[in-house]
Every structure is written in structure tokens, then in C-alpha cells.
Image (cartoon, rainbow, N blue to C red):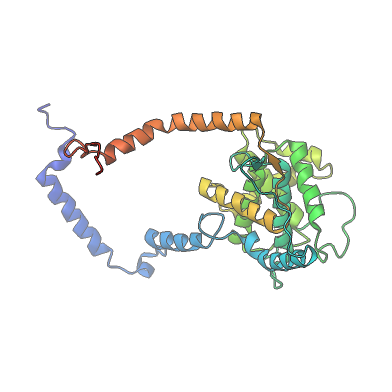
Amino acid sequence: MGGTTSCCVSGSPKLRRNAHSRLESYHQESDLSREETGCNLQHISDRENVDEINMEYNPSDHPRASTIFLSKSQNEVKDKRKSLFINNHGMSRRKYSSCSTIFLDDNTVSQPNLKYTIKCVALAIYYHIKNRDTDGGTLLDIFDEKLHPLSKSEVPRDYNQHDPEQKQIYRFVRTLFSAAQLTSECAIVTLVYLERLLTYAEIDISPGNWKRIVLGAILLASKVWDDQAVWNVDYCQILKDITVEDMNELERKFLELLQFNINVPSSVYAKYYFDLRSLSESNNLSFPLEPLSREKAQKLEAISRLCDDKYKDVRRAARKRSASTDNLCGIRWAPAILP
């Protein structure tokens, strides 16, 4: 108060003139070319624009981009639907709700069914391997099962020639999830990281590297999603012949290829969940439908009441903002007399 130094010192006209003069000298020096100054860094605005363009086509980052596994399964899904229509003579066996009975599945976006979610993720990985590009992308040694085997048994020479079956992929993923006690949400995040790796690193998942890619995605997803993450040494207890150093190197390389982008927005998570449901329905892997029981109806009603109480104040505030002119011109209701 009254001193020479205060928080409003930046408002002085003298200081503004000094700042303006410094800006002018800076513009004069910036006329030099980047070669003369020795600075070849890209401008930050250019980098942001490039990232935004790439993000629009990356399904693991952008919620509007179509998932890769769903697009790769479209061709075979059409053939399967045609064969099922011919075999069943166009008759559908799907259960539909009626006025007396409501069929629901034990699967929601906030709490997916573990067994069927793992089956859907295994099916998505199967389509990735089967419909991969024939030319092939970059082959990385860290994911090669010949260089880094998961067991002491001898790897066959044609290990990268035969595509694995869906059941084989499902057994591998189910073993890791049951032994590490991972959640169903972790399976969806695993698929997000897998497709993000294929997009960022520009590689293809093939018969020779799918196990280590899936293992790295599960390892990272369990640490990011679960509060009590599984340590790398715990995976060595599941896979007896793998070392902790190999697990550490796999995790480190996976993170580097992801550019340390482990963020999964809720919109991206929901997109992968519903695309997995679409994949399961198109492959006759639909979640089992059960009649709505009294106990389950009471639970759903209790959950809806909690949500209603939670957002009641928000709706009330929104209603007040939208009805701010009601006092100016009120609406009066009067009984009408019809002749």
C-alpha cells in the first residue's frame, strides 16, 4: 500500500513501453533463417495440427473413428450371416421381450461380463491376425517368439506361418486373466492398447508375435486400470519359463512404442465396448439373455433412484436457467366451457 512495489506494477505505461521495445528487437532478430540460427525445430502449432489429423483416424484415441477389429471382421461376418440364413431357412432364434417377460443380459458398459468379454476380445484379436496385411509392417524383435520364447519348449520353424484358432487365443487370454484375477474392464483396455500399438508402431499382429503383444497389452492395462496392479514377477509365476528382465524389457518397449500415451477416455472405452457387442452379435456370440427377475428389477430400480438423486440438483439448476423469464409472463390455466 503506497510503496514502490505492488502487484499492479505491470500496468505502468513505462513498463509497457519497455516491453514493446523488447518485442520489436525480438522480431528483428527472428528474421534470420533457421539454417543460420541452427534451430530446425518444428513450430508447436504445426505439431498440434498433425497430431489432430492423425488422431481422427486412430480409433484408440478418437471416439468417432471406427475400430480396426470391427472393420476387419465385416467381410467374414456377411458370409456367416448368409450361411446362417440358408441353414436356418431365415428363422431367427433370438429372444425378444414382451409385455409379460423382459429379457436382459448380465452385461453393462460399467460392469461387463468377464467370460464373454474375454471371448469377444479373443475374437477381435483373431480377426486382426487373420485379416492382417499380406505385405506386413515392421517386425520388432521384442515381440518375436523365436527370439523371446514364452516357454522352454522348442519353437517350431513354421511358428509364424499358421494362424492360431480363436479357441487358442481365448485360452491364452483366459489363463492370464484368471491367474492374475483381472477384471473385465481390463480386457477392453487391453484391446485399446493393442490397436494403439499397431497404429503407432505401424506393425501387424501375426502368428509369430501375437502372444507377446497380447501379454504386453495385458501387463500394461492391468497396471493402469486396476488399483492393486499385478507385478511383473507375478506374471513370471504364471508363465514359468519367462524371466523378470524379459517382462521389464517388454513393458518398457511397449510404453515407448505407445509414446507413453496410456490415457483411455471414457468415450473411447464405451466405443470399444459397444463395438465388441456388435462383433459378438454378428458372430453368434451374443451374451446370454435371462428373464428379468423380481430381485434384479429391485436392484435396477435402486440404481435408478441413486442416479436420479445424484442428478436432481443439476436438472433443477438447468430448469431454472431455462425458465428465467417465467415471472415476466406467466401462463394461467382456466377451465373452458364448451357449447
Question: For the image shown, how many numbered marks are present on the structure?
Answer: 0
Residue closest to the eye, 259 or 71: 71
Looking at the image, is 304 positioned above or below residue 221?
above
Looking at the image, the residue that sits furthest to the bottom is 135
Residue at horizontal 27%, vertical 38%?
321
Residue 3 place in picture, x, y as percent? 12, 28
Looking at the image, is 3 positioned above or below residue 89?
above
Residue at horizontal 23%, vertical 64%?
28
Image-based side of 170 in relation to 54, left or right: right
Residue at horizontal 56%, vertical 53%?
259
Residue 271 place in picture, x, y as percent? 56, 52
Q: Is residue 243 visible?
A: no
Residue 245, image quadrant: top right
Residue closest to the eye, 52 or 234: 52
Looking at the image, the residue that sits furthest to the top is 1
Residue 147 place in picture, x, y as percent? 79, 57
Where, quadrant-wise, is the N terminus in this rendering? top left
Residue at horizontal 64%, vertical 32%?
296
Where, quadrant-wise, is the C terminus in this rendering? top left
Residue closest to the eye, 19 or 286: 286
Residue 34, image quadrant: bottom left
Residue closest to the eye, 321 or 217: 321
Residue 150 place in picture, x, y as percent? 81, 49
Image-based side of 330 in relation to 74, left or right: left
Image-based side of 275 in relation to 319, left or right: right
Q: Is residue 23 visible?
A: yes
